[in-house]
Image (cartoon, rainbow, N blue to C red):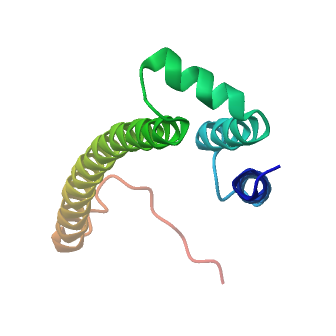
Amino acid sequence: MNGWQILSIIVAVFVLACVIEMMRRRKLREKYAGVWLVVAVGVVVLAVIPQAAEFLAKLTGVQTPSNFVFLLSGVVLALVSLHLSVEVGHLEEEVRTSIEEIALLRCELEDTRRALEARIAAFEKAPDNVNGLPEVSRVR
């Protein structure tokens, strides 16, 4: 094996170990880990079977296998970036919706608080009305 093949295998195994460890510690979600696991396995396959890179380079019209690998890595990174941009868009929408709901709940809470304070103030200002209540006799 050539030095670049060994280096590729070492890097791929390192990436696999990091992804698995991050999943185990719940720092990386499964849907993102899948992409990195596929990338690491792809790097191992291309390192162990260099003829695959040559075949794919010829199939796509790229002159050298190394250029094909660079092209492939650029495409993978662009797809990951696009996916993360979509996720950020969804999260921004969720945050905006949550902020609007919190603002509405605060307004409702303030209205309820004001109504309660008004009722308490009215109750405190009202004279004690004991008309119509039965007499209470004192026990000696």
Residue at 75% across, 58% down: 3
Residue 2 picture location, percent across and down: 77, 52
**138 sits left or right of 23 in the view:** left
**In front of the other: 131 or 40:** 40
Question: Which residue reaches farthest right?
Answer: 1
Report which quarter residue 11 is drawn in.
bottom right
Residue 27 picture location, percent across and down: 65, 59
Residue 118 picture location, percent across and down: 17, 64
Report which quarter residue 50 is drawn in.
top right
Report which quarter residue 114 is drawn in.
bottom left
Residue 53 picture location, percent across and down: 62, 30
Task: Work out whether 35 lies above or below 114.
Answer: above
Residue at 73% across, 38% down: 41
**In front of the other: 116 or 56:** 56
**28 sits left or right of 94 in the view:** right
Residue at 63% across, 46% down: 29
**123 sits left or right of 72 in the view:** left
Q: Is the C terminus in the top left, top right, bottom left or bottom right quadrant?
A: bottom right
Task: Work out whether 47 lies above or below 11.
Answer: above
Counting the numbered discs, the total is: 0
Task: Work out whether 64 lies above or below 129.
Answer: above
Question: Which residue reaches farthest bottom?
Answer: 140
**In front of the other: 29 or 103:** 29
